[in-house]
């Protein structure tokens, strides 16, 4: 009986879940808030300047990869486990690049808090990512306002639009992608990748959406994009 009780306590306080080969371990909690969240409900990256003292705290988790490291897979495992426990947001605590581990605090944010958090984001900023940090080194190129930009996996390009400005991003040729992005008041950041991190490509010159390819821009979930900005390096190009 004593062994069974100890086992139950261990299960309640240190939960390990497998998701696409990733492992999610609770270091604190989970503390239930009885919220029921669907897997397609919005998920948010909490900005560093947002005061979390009065927020609904769910717990702290550590995410580690399976046999093949992937930042996107680790993020998806984090999102899935967070929503299972009633959390719709996370704050990055640390990222162990050599050890490939993400530690994050999970919270439930009200609509008002989401709005306050959004006001702290880098408005009218465009990010373009190369491939995943892990795996063979890759190099890709795209055009920004007619100028070629080279990008290596594990890095990102960043540009902040000036008021009234309109910029052009081009990838590929006849079947490639052309995007125009215009400045708007309080416009949330836009996150794209030229390789990995997403499921479907942004298509402007063709009508049928294609799987992610290096000849396309792939639009990213904003929480994933914000996480990548926090853990990857900006290009020096």
Image (cartoon, rainbow, N blue to C red):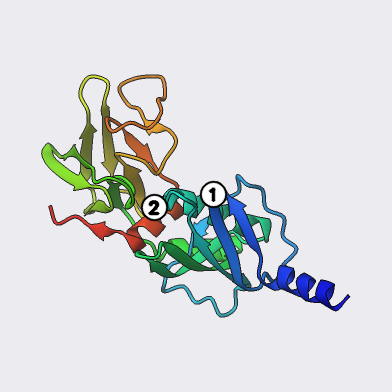
Graded by Cα atoms within 10 Å as few (under 14), some (14 to 19) or many (20 or more), the crowding at tag 2 reads many
Mark 1–mark 2 distance (CA, rounded to whole Å):
21 Å
> Are the residues tagged 1 and 2 within 8 Å (C-beta)?
no
Residue 108 visible in this rendered orientation of the protein: no
Question: In this orientation, which residue lies closer to the viewer: 117 or 18?
Answer: 18
- Measuring from the top left, give residue 71's x and y in whole percent: 41, 53
Q: Which disc is residue 110 wearing?
A: none
User: For numbered disc 2, what is the local secondary structure?
Assistant: helix
User: For numbered disc 1, what is the local secondary structure?
Assistant: loop
The residue under label 2 is: 225
Graded by Cα atoms within 10 Å as few (under 14), some (14 to 19) or many (20 or more), the crowding at tag 1 reads some
Look at 75% across and 63% down and name the residue there. 34
Residue 131 visible in this rendered orientation of the protein: yes
Look at 39% across and 19% down and name the residue there. 207
- Measuring from the top left, give residue 236's x and y in whole percent: 14, 57
The residue under label 1 is: 21
- Measuring from the top left, give residue 91's x and y in whole percent: 48, 68
From what the image shows, is residue 75 above or below residue 212?
Answer: below
Look at 69% across and 73% down and name the residue there. 13
Q: Nearer the viewer, mark 1 or mark 2?
A: 1
- Measuring from the top left, give residue 194's x and y in whole percent: 29, 39
Mark 1 vs 2, N-terminal side: 1
Q: Give the number of marks.
A: 2
- Point out the image quarter for the N terminus: bottom right
203 on left or right of 236: right
From what the image shows, is residue 75 above or below residue 198?
Answer: below
Look at 35% across and 27% down and name the residue there. 203
């Amino acid at each position: 009986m004593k062994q069974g009780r100890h086992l139950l306590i261990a299960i309640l306080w240190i939960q390990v879940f497998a998701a696409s080969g990733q492992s999610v371990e609770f270091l604190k909690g989970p503390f239930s808030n009885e919220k029921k969240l669907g897997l397609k409900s919005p998920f948010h990256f909490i900005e560093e300047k947002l005061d979390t003292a009065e927020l609904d705290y769910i717990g702290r988790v550590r995410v580690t990869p399976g046999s093949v490291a992937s930042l996107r897979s680790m993020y998806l495992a984090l999102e899935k486990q967070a929503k299972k426990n009633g959390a719709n947001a996370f704050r990055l605590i640390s990222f162990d690049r050599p050890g490939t581990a993400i530690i994050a605090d999970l919270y439930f944010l009200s609509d008002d808090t989401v709005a306050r958090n959004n006001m702290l984001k880098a408005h009218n900023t465009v990010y373009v990512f190369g491939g995943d940090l892990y795996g063979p080194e890759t190099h890709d190129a795209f055009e920004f306002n007619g100028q070629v930009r080279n990008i290596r996996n594990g890095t990102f390009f960043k540009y902040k639009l000036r008021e009234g400005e309109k910029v052009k991003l081009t990838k590929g040729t006849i079947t490639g992608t052309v995007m125009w992005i215009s400045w708007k008041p309080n416009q949330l950041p836009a996150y794209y990748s030229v390789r990995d991190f997403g499921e479907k490509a942004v298509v402007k010159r063709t009508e049928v959406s294609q799987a992610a390819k290096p000849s396309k821009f792939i639009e990213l979930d904003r929480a994933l994009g914000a996480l990548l900005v926090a853990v990857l390096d900006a290009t020096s190009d």
